[in-house]
Image (tube, helix red, strand yellow):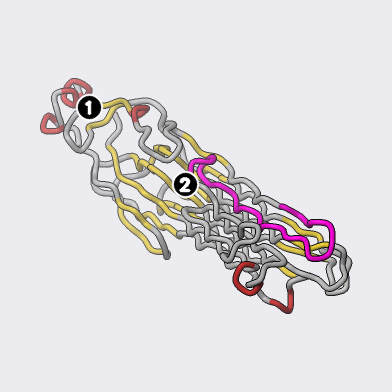
Amino acid sequence: MTHYSLLVGSSGGGLSATSFVELNSGSSTFTVPEGYNAIHIQFAVGGGGGAFRGASYDKAGGESAGAGGGSGGYISDKILTVTSEETITYSIGSGGAANNNQATRYNGSASAGTNTTLSGSSTGSLFTLNSGGGASASGGGVQGPLRSNTAGTAGSATISGTAITSGIFSDTDNSVKNVNTNTSGPTSTFNDSGNGVAGDNNGNCGGDNCQIGGSDGADSYAGTVLGGVGSPVGGTAGGSAGTRGSGGGGGGAQYSVEEIAGHGAGGGNGEIKYRFLQVI
């Protein structure tokens, strides 16, 4: 009887889906409306990692590109069980800062992002999307040797809540749909989640005064959101910042405007976009 009522529209007994809400920063709470039993996460991602600056040397026999930051773990169109009227607590991850400190250009680290989390007062932890790691460098010196560059690491995704993969619901226009028709998230795949990826690492170029471009930051959402771009070879711009949980782009080396083109950039902030459903 409940299924039949829902098929003739929400006025027959089913609750229509709520409007989407997007969260881009901070930590706080919200409440599951009365009668709803599911939260649809259209997208969510941990913060992206920061990139490292490029480094030039005196008589070291080469130059170093800054490595890119890693991207955060993600969710795309996943529906999780919640309890009517429970309190949901969220925290949105921040993107990690780049390391452009001249004093630590041969040995130092950029910042990792921070995690994006969601939990219910009754249902407990729903998910933790770990952030991407910050890029780093070690072992270098102004007279050599060339430093070793390390890209930011991938963030992981831990889904603790119970996923709903079958059933029907009434959409905002009162049309009845199967839950698996929710494919509007970044990856266009229902019930999708996964780890981020590591940033790029262009390493070093050989020969004094060679030019090398900065490394790209890691893409987020399984490659659908591009990471920050590394400083282009011979260009005048530094690396660009990541967005939506992707990693920041690294700085280059041996440019005429070293203090600009040599700079890396920060990672993208995390995010959550959600709505509530009554799934039958």
Among the 4 quarters of the image, the one containing residue 166 = top left
Among the 4 quarters of the image, the one containing residue 266 = bottom right
Residue 97 percent across, percent down from the top left: 58, 67
| Direction bottom: furthest residue | 103
Q: Is residue 126 magenta?
A: no
Location of mark 2 (residue): 126
Disc number placed over residue 151 in the picture, else none: none
Location of mark 1 (residue): 176
Looking at the image, residue 178 lies above or below residue 200? above
Q: Which residues are magenta?
A: 202-224
Question: In the shown orientation, is residue 220 left or right of residue 257?
Answer: left
Question: In the shown orientation, is residue 118 left or right of residue 105?
Answer: left
Residue 217 percent across, percent down from the top left: 60, 53
**What residue is at 38 percent from the left and 42 percent from the top?**
42
**What residue is at 64 percent from the left and 56 percent from the top?**
68
Residue 78 percent across, percent down from the top left: 42, 37
Looking at the image, residue 15 lies above or below residue 198? above
| Direction left: furthest residue | 11
